[in-house]
Image: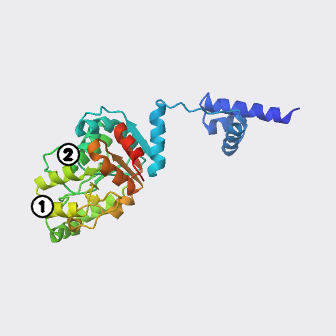
Amino acid sequence: MNSLLEQNRLLYKIAREYYENHLTQNDIANKFGLSRIKISRLLHLARENKIVTITLHAPDALTAEREEALEKRYGLEEARIIQCEETIEQREIARALAPAATDILLRRLTPDCIVGVTWGNTIQAFVDALPLKPQHNIKIVQLNGELSPIWRLENSAELSRQLAFKLSAELHVLSAPGLARTKEAADLFKNDTLIAETLRLAARANIAVLGIGMLQKSSRILLDNGLLSENDIQELDAKTAVGDIALRYINANGRPLNLALDDRIIGLTFEQLCKIPCVIAVAGGEQKHAAIRAALKTHMINVLVTDHVTAAYLLKAES
């Protein structure tokens, strides 16, 4: 009897049950009187012996190649590129990117997961696009305090509430301004028992979903809301800030800036944000190109959802 032929017959049968009939490895083990570990090894051997070959067919080969190139270039776990009209505005770009970002979040959620969320139009679009998907034992927590009036839809507490509702999650709001007027006022907030507890929980987040702020627009909004002063704007300009991540400003090289306003921020520090295992950034549009590139250079971001024009810019930009 040809032992090699018999082995290959067995490999074929096991592979067929697994790949075509979709039996689990445990089911196959029971059927053939083998251990699950043995089945796993035989499936591996079936691939080595070319009894099983796997061919991947990308739904959009060019986009898939560019996503892989972005991942390699910037050390990302995952990149997702969305085709957008080149003339659409920032809000429309955010709405176009949002469905892909929600798919990624839902895929990465696990029981007992803590999800941190920021504020702004991009996160609003993300929350709007998220379907009702109740999860098991998920916590939603704000990563920074309020940066817009409570009645605004992009208010971080409101977005956190909507996200928690859609996921049937436990909600932890940060009942404080995102930026206090003085360091002393910020210290008082951060020393409050409930706020300190929420910040500790935020620092333990497994996943963060955030946008990337561009200096001119975001700083103008904060200035109009009375959160930034003209002196703050001048310091940002003097230190060549290009954008922010959760109000932590960075330069073009992705380095955090040592700013006077840092002590007034009620939210996670730059170092704490960097320690979150999975940071999903949703950002696109020509106005944000420099800020997005700088944010990727921080190596804080694991997953990027962006538009095809921004992706092309990021791939062409010099290292």
Task: Mark 2 vs mark 1: give the one in front.
Answer: 1
Q: Is residue 209 visible?
A: no
Q: Position of residue 68 (x, y in %)?
A: 48, 42
Q: Indicate the secondary structure of the residue bearing disc 1.
A: helix
* Amino acid type indicated by mark 1: Glu
Picture quarter containing residue 43? top right
* Residue that mark 1 sits on: 230
Q: Which residue is mark 2?
A: 154
CA separation in Å, label 2 and label 1: 24 Å
Q: Quadrant of the N terminus?
A: top right
- For marks 2 and 1, the one nearer the N-term is 2
Sort mark 2 into few (<14), some (14-19) or many (20+) by Cα contacts within 10 Å.
many
Is residue 56 toward the left or the right of residue 306 in the image? right
Residue drawn at 75 percent across, 33 percent down: 10
- What is the three-letter code of the residue carrying label 2? Glu
Residue at screen point 71% across, 32% down: 51
